[in-house]
Amino acid sequence: MASAAKNLSTYDESNLPDAADFSFGIVVADWNAEITHALYDGCVQTLLKHGAREDCIHTIQVPGSFELPQGARLLAGAKKVDVLIAIGCVIKGETSHNEYINQAVAQGLTRLSLMSGKPCVFGVLTPNDERQARDRAGGKYGNKGVEAAVTAIRMAALARSLQQPAARIGFGDR
Ligand code: RBF
């Protein structure tokens, strides 16, 4: 999934946890591939930059964004991952298909996240047109894949910290 993605997104790196401790599951929708693969590149580059091991980044591709929740569920069942990242791009067209897809994806990922207890990062662009998409996939508004990676690292660390025995509800001191 090579692309000419640029990493222009800025974030506070000073307190970002080391990603070396975590395993990542990434699901990429191939619809609008020029955009989603650029998001993916930005995401992976950022995970690696912050210490993630290549063999701890598990990637699968699904046909379109509608399939992201199912893909994420299948990936979570097949690989031991600390956090899931869903990457897609649903461009608004003449009809209302985008509303149905966006709702389904957002609700599907939310349900998966809450039911499984596994953080699930929403890396789906919902632009009005291709220009808006390009602006956010390595263009003038940065690369939202980078931001998805940063969120994933933070959520993986948060989940890990609360999984410590003393932090579990009902056990030990709180
Ligand atoms: N998938 C996307 O990820 N982005 C899109 O912009 C997108 N547009 C679609 C437009 C129409 C009219 C249809 C029917 C599907 C579209 N899909 C899109 C694909 C969708 O996410 C899914 O893969 C298919 O509907 C098969 O379940």
Image (cartoon, helix red, strand yellow):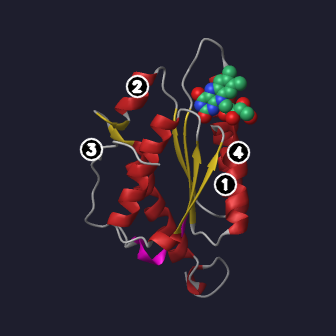
Which residue is outermost to the top?
94
Alpha-carbon distance for marks 2 and 3? 15 Å
Q: Secondary structure at mark 2?
A: helix
Left or right: residue 109 versus residue 124 is right
Q: Secondary structure at mark 4?
A: helix
Looking at the image, which residue is at 65% across and 76% down? Answer: 169
Are there few (<14), some (14-19), or many (20+) residues within 10 Å of tag 3? some
Alpha-carbon distance for marks 4 and 2? 25 Å
Callout in the foreground (4, 1) = 1
Looking at the image, which residue is at 35% across and 30% down? Answer: 135
- Percent position (x, y) of residue 92? 56, 20
- The reply to whether residue 99 is visible in this rendering is no
Looking at the image, which residue is at 47% across and 20% down? Answer: 129
Q: Secondary structure at mark 3?
A: loop
Q: Which mark is residue 108?
A: 4
Callout in the foreground (4, 2) = 2
Q: Earlier in the sequence, mark 4 or mark 3?
A: 3
- Percent position (x, y) of residue 75? 67, 61
- The quarter in which the C terminus is drawn is bottom right
Q: Secondary structure at mark 1?
A: helix
Alpha-carbon distance for marks 4 and 3? 30 Å
Looking at the image, which residue is at 38% across and 50% down? Answer: 42
- Percent position (x, y) of residue 107? 68, 42
Tell me the kind of residue under disc 4: Gly
Alpha-carbon distance for marks 2 and 1? 26 Å
Q: Which residues are magenta?
A: 19-24
Q: Earlier in the sequence, mark 4 or mark 1?
A: 1
Q: Is mark 2 within 8 Å of ligand 1?
A: no
Tell me the kind of residue under disc 2: Gln
Q: Which mark is residue 72?
A: 1
Q: Earlier in the sequence, mark 2 or mark 3?
A: 3
